[in-house]
Image (cartoon, coloured by chain):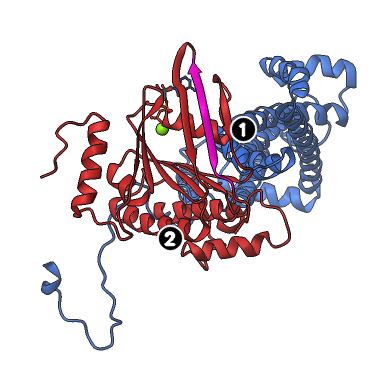
Amino acid sequence: MASNARGLRVANLVRRFGDRAVLDGLDLDIAPGEFVALLGRSGSGKSTLLRAIAGLDYDVTGTGELDVPDRVSVAFQDSRLLPWLRVLDNVVLGVGGSDAREHGRQALAEVGLEGRERAWPSELSGGEQQRVALARCLVRDPEVLLADEPFGSLDALTRIRMHGLLRELCARHRPAVLLVTHDVDEAVELADRVVVLEDGRIRLDVAVTLPAPRSHRDPGFQSYRDQLLLALGITEGATP
Amino acid sequence: MTRTLEPPPRATSPPVTTRTRKRRLGLGKPIPFGRVLGPLLLIGLWSAASATGLLDPRILSAPWTVVEAGVRLTEDGTLPDSIATSLSRAAIGFLVGASVGTSLAVAAGLSRIGEALIDGSVQVKRAIPTLGLIPLLILWLGIGEAFKIVVIALGVAVTLYIQTYSSLTGIDSRYVELAEVVGLNRRQFVRKVVFPGALPGFFVGLRLGVTGSWLALVVLEQINATSGIGYLMFQAQNYGQTEVILVGLVVYGLFGFVSDALLRVLERRVLSWRRTLAG
Ligand SMILES: Nc1ncnc2c1ncn2[C@@H]1O[C@H](COP(=O)(O)OP(=O)(O)O)[C@@H](O)[C@H]1O
Ligand SMILES: [Mg+2]
């Protein structure tokens, strides 16, 4: 692991489309190895924040401080594999060095896709494609992993498997993680900290201190969930 | 369950469940050699009409007369010579046109300067049908081989340019974003993202270009030529030999069919990552 891994620091970030400020003086710090889940209503600016951190914001004006390490990986909601590259070539896309392919193979093995190196993306299931995308993130040995609803398009069963895989990979590689999700359970299950974005700022910042195998039935889990649902403005809160 | 109603499998039969496969929304399995069925049926009708005297040979010769004419013209060397002449015109015109069109498209698609210099001009040219340029080109080039090749090449070049340019510039912005995230440099981006992404459009251009080159060839050889398939047909028209005209048409048809089939095979190999409904 990189010895001097850096976290991520966002200070007083402003991003506006036209004259509407989507992010309005937002502050967020993520320590090295910390897993942060970002919740917020649709249109609250979650993707805008992620894109700003990833350096992908072009047609947007704004100010603020961004302290982001060099090695940043991004997982999109779609797996975004290039259909004309085989799986391994997708994983090592843009990675230099003579041992890139060997690292790519290792990363594929880590996500459970050993032996599928020469498959075309179209031959894989949605979950497998998303795992390839994870391998593509891993092989860059990221200090920061940004993920924008990476499981949003997967079915419930596949999503549960991916949760396990993501937790395991993050525990092993220890990047600072910012996971955008609209799923409160997903956030409480995976994250060390859950933040809620509202009106352009972080309105709620909760450390989740539940022990490792987190169960949805645990009363502690439920109280986190209720607190977050309330912050998201969903008042019927209590689950049957 | 319906399965219990089936007779028990005999000991010799392999243990395979034969269930009728569900119909998919795609076109289903292609019929073997399906593409030649339609033409065969037409030839059958044509033969029947000729044999029964329903079809006047002065309007349309019988199929066997056409075959005889083909054999005769092949034996006296007329047909092979004409084919060689026509083929080389079309091939050279196509290759020159395809190279020029593709190069221009790459230049225009990958640089703003290229785009400014090239794209406008080609779009203007596009509005003028190539065949409409024939009078001007005859004044410049005479009516020799160079003229014919230039006319064919011009049409092919415009077609290839348009298809290739639009697919080079129309790449999915999500892939551009990905390329930035994984830190591709400009060269890698072009090689791994832009070019492969533009290949399908390029192949559409190639196939349209081939069709266009045959079209131009037919027109050119019938206006003013002293050799080639079109010339052969033109002569036959003067002597009322419909069977020779038909031989010429069959040859043109075969040219078109074979060249398109070759391109399809090539396309399928190069774009093997694509899985389409046509299979
Ligand atoms: N390129 C753009 N141009 C104009 N408005 C945009 C653009 N991208 C996002 N927005 C607006 O910014 C707001 C936040 O968008 P986004 O960050 O995508 O929200 P979400 O939290 O759902 O990811 C939305 O209201 C959206 O309409
Ligand atoms: Mg979003």
Front one among A201 and B113: A201
Query: Which disc, if any, is residue B1?
Result: none
Q: Quadrant of the C terminus of chain A?
A: top left
**Where does the image place residue B277, in percent across and percent down from the top left?**
43, 47
Kindly report the distance in space between the C-alpha atoms of the residues bearing marks 1 and 2: 41 Å
Marks 1, 2 in one chain? no
Helix, strand or loop for the magenta stretch, by majority = strand
> Magenta span covers which residues?
A6-17
List the residue tagged with mark 1.
Answer: B167
Q: Is residue B183 left or right of residue B140?
A: left
Judged from the image, the secondary structure of the residue bearing numbered disc 2 is: helix
Subunit that carries the residue with mark 2? A
Q: Is residue B121 left or right of residue A137?
A: right
B22 to B208, vertically: above or below: below
Kind of residue sitting beneath label 1: Ser
Q: Nearer the viewer, mark 1 or mark 2?
A: 2
Which chain wears red? A
Front one among A24 and B167: A24
A104 to B40, vertically: above or below: below
Image colour assigned to chain B: blue
**Where does the image place residue A166, in percent across and percent down from the top left?**
42, 55
- Decide whether residue A13 is among the magenta residues: yes
**Where does the image place residue B243, in percent across and percent down from the top left?**
64, 40
Q: Is residue B70 in view?
A: yes
